[in-house]
Amino acid sequence: MKKLTLALLSVLAFGSIAAAQDSVTVYGRIDLGVGISRINNGFGDKENNAQMVTGAGTSNRIGIKGEEDLGSGYKIKFVLENGFDADTGAEATEGLAFSREATLQIVSPFGILAAGRSSILGTDGGSFNMLGNVNPFGTGIWELGNQNIVYGKMPASRFDNAFTYRSPEYKGLQLTTEYSMGEDGKENRSTSNHYFGLGVTWKGGPAETVVLFERVNEALTTEKRNPKDMWRITAGGNWKFSATTAYLSLQYFKNADALGTASYSALKDHGIGSITSAQMKKLDGLEGENVILGFSTPLMGGKVLGAVGYVHAKSDELANKLKADGGFVALGYQYPFSKTTRLYSAVGASAAKYKSGDQTVKPRGFYGTLGLSHYF
């Protein structure tokens, strides 16, 4: 909490500077809404909820960003960004003053070099994200349409002590690479996760495309003394057909230890068939592929979003094989009251099927939400 207080004091201090200098800006987003859900985890637990939700349309954040022009095409930039929950005022990540991003960047004619805490490349957030154009929902409207439901799950969406390089754009092509040395005090050691990403984007005419390779050298732990390094390859993009935009994402992953599919956490807690909970928590060999198809089109001054995603995964790591199938379907609508305020709504469902031996578990969930996002 002390760190958050210091962060807010820094915001106020920089806010006064921003009045005198155009190079420093305080910005943020606040999002609140209501949501209803009906969830069956497949193990006999059912929940019906009506609740206030926060960060459903966009993640809540407050940040400071700025730049200094050094001349001859060189600049120094920085981004300091913290996440929070608008319904309670709590930090999104306890104990971190700038949980979403803390980077210092050198901009030059040869590209951008950044260092600090940064998002992985395989997401739709942060200064260097590369998967914000493959799904109209991105990482979702609340529990709806989130591409991470079907993607092979990374150990984290942000890493400390990361270096990122983004090349200049050449004929629509641009390269981005990132490497994280791992946790503070454990840099480049086997007891810390190390992330590596390398991707290429291309923009031309009505199309945007991306191909991205990501790998995590997983940390040695008491539970996993010889972990398999998780990796994934994602390809996709979007294509504008007059007013409508079509989206596609394809991914293959290997050696994942978890999925984002419905009630996978409950599967780890309960086990399945002869696979115990302890074995599920040590599982490190999930292999699979997934696909997302989506669209967005204008309607009555706003925009309609639709997407469907599917994943198939399996693991032969244990004596009894585990098979997993899951996916989502979502339909949403966004209406801008102004350039900074947006109404959104969405409905949809997610479901999965887990099978090992003669036992099958079929969790499912239905969701609906209505909310308001304000950007400042």
Image (spheres, rainbow, N blue to C red):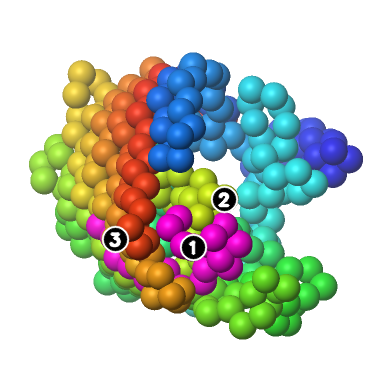
Identify residue for label 3: 312
Q: Whole-percent x and y of residue 315? A: 39, 70
Question: Which residue is found at the position 43% from the left and 58% from the top?
Answer: 273
Question: Which residue is found at the position 56% from the left and 66% from the top?
Answer: 279
**In the current view of this chain or complex, which residue is farthest to the left?**
242
Callout 1: SS = loop
Badge 1 amino acid: Ile
Regarding residue 289, the answer to whether it shows in the image is yes
**In the current view of this chain or complex, which residue is farthest to the right?**
2
Q: Is residue 362 left or right of residue 17?
A: left
Badge 2 amino acid: Asp
- Of discs 2 and 3, which sits in the foreground? 2
Callout 2: SS = helix
Residue nearer the viewer, 278 or 5: 278
Mark 2–mark 3 distance (CA, rounded to whole Å): 21 Å
Residue 85 lies in quadrant = top right
Mark 1–mark 3 distance (CA, rounded to whole Å): 19 Å
Identify residue for label 2: 269
Q: Is residue 294 left or right of residue 255?
A: left
Q: Quadrant of the N terminus?
A: top right
